[in-house]
Amino acid sequence: YHLGPKVLEFSNHFYQNNDIRKIIRPAAEELAEEFGETIYIAKLFDSHVIYIDAIYPKSNMGGRNVIGIQADTYCTGVGKSLLAYQDQNIIDDIIKKGLKPYTKNTITNSEVLNEELEEIRKRGYAIDNMEHEHGIKCVAVPLFNVTGEVVAAMSISGPSLRFGDKEIEKFTKTLVEISKKYSSLIM
């Protein structure tokens, strides 16, 4: 057995009809150009995140295609910003599956992860400090729907050399504002 062209048709239908993507994409495109970094939008899928969109600045149109790719929640900015707002039993299930180290910065201790998730809830954003890929940092915010449920996350991602404290502060301030602005539009 093998996958045929019908799977592409289904994925294109999902991609074109995704309300979150349609609503947030214009703001994401502006962010990509303003900051010159890649913007990712992801949703929680089982115990992973799945990337539903990636927006690259015009100066970097050769970015890799991550749409449809899954990643662990505990070591990505979008994943941690989604995980922070889940029930503790979901977090515990992910921890039970194991916190595999991707880099020397990956959080592999359950207590440290729970503390990190609490900090994310307090400040409203997550930071991936080269936890999934060496040399890549990102900041991410949860995206809420009109009922206050976390339905997706958006991140700014790029080389760690361009993500100093000052830049992270600027990125997070803008992302938090966008999250607040668009939450009233997501069903």
Image (tube, grey):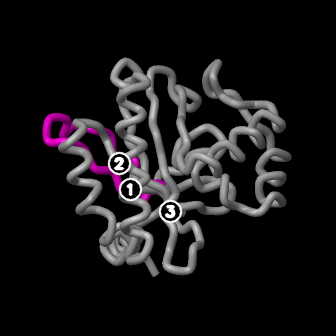
Q: Earlier in the sequence, mark 2 or mark 3?
A: 3
The percent coordinates of residue 140 (x first, y second) are 48, 46
Residue named by callout 2: 174
- The quarter holding residue 162 reads top left
Could you tell me which residue is drawn at 77 percent across and 43 percent down?
Answer: 114
**Would you say residue 55 sits in the magenta stretch?**
yes
Q: Earlier in the sequence, mark 1 or mark 3?
A: 3
Q: Residue at x 36, y 58 (%)?
A: 178
Whether residue 104 sits left or right of residue 94 in the image: it is: left
Amino acid tagged 1: Glu
Residue 16, given in percent of the width and then of the height, sits at: 30, 73
Which residue position holds label 3? 152
- Disc 2 and disc 3 in contact, CB within 8 angstroms: no
Asked which secondary structure carries label 1, the reply is helix
Q: Secondary structure at mark 2?
A: helix
Q: Label 2 near label 1: C-beta < 8 Å?
A: yes
Measured in 3D between alpha carbons, the distance from the residue under mark 1 to the one under mark 3, in whole angstroms, is: 15 Å
Which residue was labeled with disc 1? 177
Relative height, residue 145 to residue 97 (above, below) = below
Looking at the rendering, in which quadrant would you find the N terminus? bottom right
At mark 3, the secondary structure is strand
Is residue 186 placed above or below 128 in the rendered structure? Answer: below
Q: In the depicted view, which residue is nearer to us: 143 or 91?
A: 143
Label for residue 88? none
Residue at 82 percent of width and 54 percent of height: 93
